[in-house]
Amino acid sequence: MTGKGGNLPGRRLFLWIILATVPTGLIGFIFKDWFEILFSKPKLVGGMLLVTGLVLWLTRFAKKEGRHIGKMGWIDSILIGIAQGMAIIPGISRSGATISTGLFCGLDRELSGKFSFLLSIPAILGATLLEFRKIGSVQELGTILIGTIVAFGVGILSLTLLLRINKIGKISYFSYYCWIIGFAIIILM
């Protein structure tokens, strides 16, 4: 689309990403200390992996054909942003929560995956900037930069695979992995 309207779907997507970032940021800011305490509770992490598995498994009941960006509304954006904010809880998959919420809202699989991926960018950048304040030395900075680059590379590869699996409607298969790991953590801890 060219001319006076420009790239309307791109602008709309950008607007919904900004809107979805607001609840994520608020949840992270308000509950940051509480979320950090949860990282020291391995059984809770196992339990949250079971919850992630259930959410992923339920996507098999989502509509096969969903709405495109032109039919996406602000409420969809807010709900997906809340799902991303809740994914700060250890054991809740950020990608799984946001893609699943998009599917439950009736968005098509490709849009749910694309929106999830793009929504991760401001969240990851924001979290990274907050962590940079805690750096005490140049050596720590180097270690953090290497870790960030490796995590970014692995994350891109993982998300590419996840988006392909989501597009063909098989994201629910990840539920079995989450359940196995979740039960193993609960039993071993």
Image: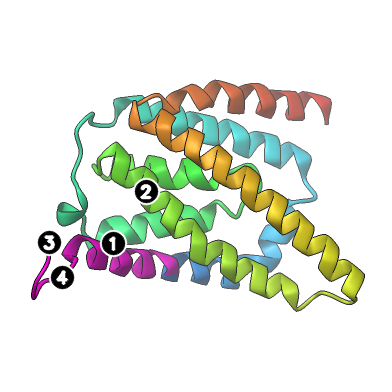
Q: CA distance from mark 1 to mark 4?
A: 13 Å
Q: Which disc, if any, is residue 6? A: 4
| Contact check, label 4 and label 2, Cβ < 8 Å | no
Q: Is residue 80 left or right of residue 2?
A: right
Secondary element type, mark 2: helix
Earlier residue among tags 4 and 3:
3
User: Disc 1 vs disc 3: which is toward the camera?
Assistant: 3
Residue 1 is tagged as 3
Q: Quadrant where the C terminus lies?
A: top right
Give the amino acid type for the residue marked by disc 4 in the picture. Gly
Q: CA distance from mark 4 to mark 3?
A: 6 Å
Q: From the viewer's perspective, is 74 left or right of 41?
A: left
Residue at x-position 30% and y-position 26%: 61
**CB of mark 4 within 8 Å of CB of mark 3?**
yes
Residues at discs 1 and 2 in contact (Cβ within 8 Å): yes
Residue 126 location in percent, x, y? Answer: 58, 70
The residue depicted at 60 percent of the width and 46 percent of the height is 155
Label 1 belongs to which residue? 13
Instruction: Decide which of tag 2 and tag 3 comes sooner along the chain.
Output: 3
Identify the magenta region: 1-21
Spatial CA distance of label 2 from label 3 is 19 Å
Q: Please tell me whether mark 3 sits on a helix, a strand or a loop.
A: loop
* Residue type, mark 3 in image: Met
> Which residue in the protein does label 2 denote?
114
